[in-house]
Amino acid sequence: MTDLVAQSHKSSSSARSGVPGTGRAAAPENLVAQSHKLSEVSVPDILEQALDGERISDDDALALLESRDLVSVGRAAHELRNRKADPGRITFIVDRNLNYTNICYTDCEFCAFYRRPGDTREGYLLPKPVIFKKIEETLALGGTGLLMQGGHHPDLGIDYYEDLFRSIKARYTIHLHALSPPEIQHIARRSKLTLWETISRLRDAGLDSIPGGGGEILVDRVRDEIAPKKTKTNEWLAVMRHAHRLGMSTTATMMYGHVETLADRVEHMRRIRELQDEMGGFRAFISWTFQNDGNRLAGKVAAEDMPTSFDYLLTQAVSRIYLDNVPHIQSSWVTQGMKIGQVALEFGADDMGSVMIEENVVSAAGTTHRTSTEELVHLIKALGKTAVQRDTLYRDVKVWS
């Protein structure tokens, strides 16, 4: 494992608190202290503090990211992971990532999946019979959940989603983990409803939980550059706050390695930690790196500045240490590949995420890793762990001893 990490490690001579290789300083809006100096902070002291059960600060998290001390940070993250979840078990879910439409008007710089309204050649909206068939295939493969997300389709209001969700629930026993916060905000605006009304009606129609998509980086300076038409930071958080108040479970995500700084990553995690302190509805945090094929944002990120597997493992490890109130951390094998996805289980992750029977968004950006239940079980057992298929709410479905 050490050799694998070493192979993926680039030179760390780039700007420490900015975007690697750019020298870009952290944004003034960040609450992370701009006068922070790595030399003033002891990484061993920070890790000892975390292992003693004390909460680390924003400055501490930034120091860990800047340190590039993957081995020490990863070891501490793994120890904290073992305290939060059974150290002898690794979980995963069998579900399908169903993208019901690719029609979207937000024009995000990083997205290669969407098609603009009016695109009759490649744009689509899946009809009900196709969605039903995909659900039946998922259930036949032992799946328990449907992760359903799509674009911001200008013609779809709440009536469409209520009808679709009720139709699904009338036919199938499946968990609907659907509609990212930006989609829910779009539905509310399109339907002239409040967020509370929108989420309440969607829940009553069959929506079980909300995925953390559209989070990207929860810093508006960054969002204005990579997705200027999409949900702002406080709007994304507002959707999740309303969902938590309604008793719904959600996840949180972070997509990084583009125009953000290291301090922006900490700011993003701070927003998640604060909302979790307030409401307690996030059950998992999933981070992944920017994929640079087929999108406009690729032109803003030099090849040498693209995040490596080293960067991924370090960021994930810091997230486990910093997000002390989030139960689960998922490994992102979909963007990193199965080998790094397996290694990530020693760097703070306790869950392998989804078998992902279908995936369209990441693959549209040039990354096409695939797996199966059998492969995940084999990889987990190779670590000497018990493989456990879970459902969306982390309840056991099947255990491979």
Image (spheres, rainbow, N blue to C red):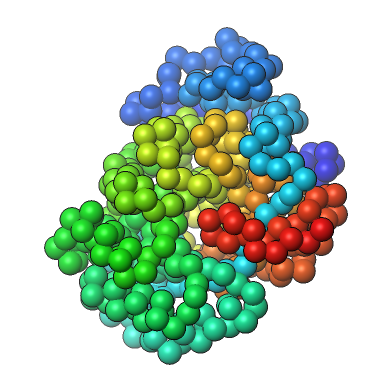
- From the top left corner, tell me how far across and down residue 286 is, in percent: 55, 49
Quick one: 120 or 81, which is closer to the camera? 81
Q: Is residue 30 above or below residue 196?
A: above
- From the top left corner, tell me how far across and down residue 106 is, in percent: 31, 61
Residue 104 located left or right of residue 351: left
- From the top left corner, tell me how far across and down residue 362 is, in percent: 54, 63
- From the top left corner, tell me how far across and down residue 263 is, in percent: 47, 30
Number of numbered labels in the structure image: 0
Q: Kindly identify the residue that appears in the image at 49 percent across and 55 percent down.
A: 298
Residue 333 located left or right of residue 174: right
Quadrant occupied by the C terminus: bottom right
Q: Kindly identify the residue that appears in the image at 81 percent across and 62 percent down.
A: 378
Q: Residue furthest left?
A: 192
Q: Is residue 62 above or below residue 257?
A: above
Q: Which of the 4 image quarters holds residue 25?
A: top left
Quick one: 245 or 266, which is closer to the camera? 245
- Tell me if residue 231 can be seen: yes
Q: Is residue 41 above or below residue 86?
A: above
Q: Which of the 4 image quarters holds residue 84?
A: top right
Q: Kindly identify the residue that appears in the image at 83 percent across and 43 percent down.
A: 1
Residue 50 located left or right of residue 295: right
Quick one: 375 or 215, which is closer to the camera? 375
Q: Residue furthest top?
A: 40
Q: Residue furthest bottom?
A: 129
Residue 45 located left or right of residue 302: right
- Tell me if residue 300 can be seen: no
Q: Kindly identify the residue that appears in the image at 31 percent across and 70 percent down.
A: 205
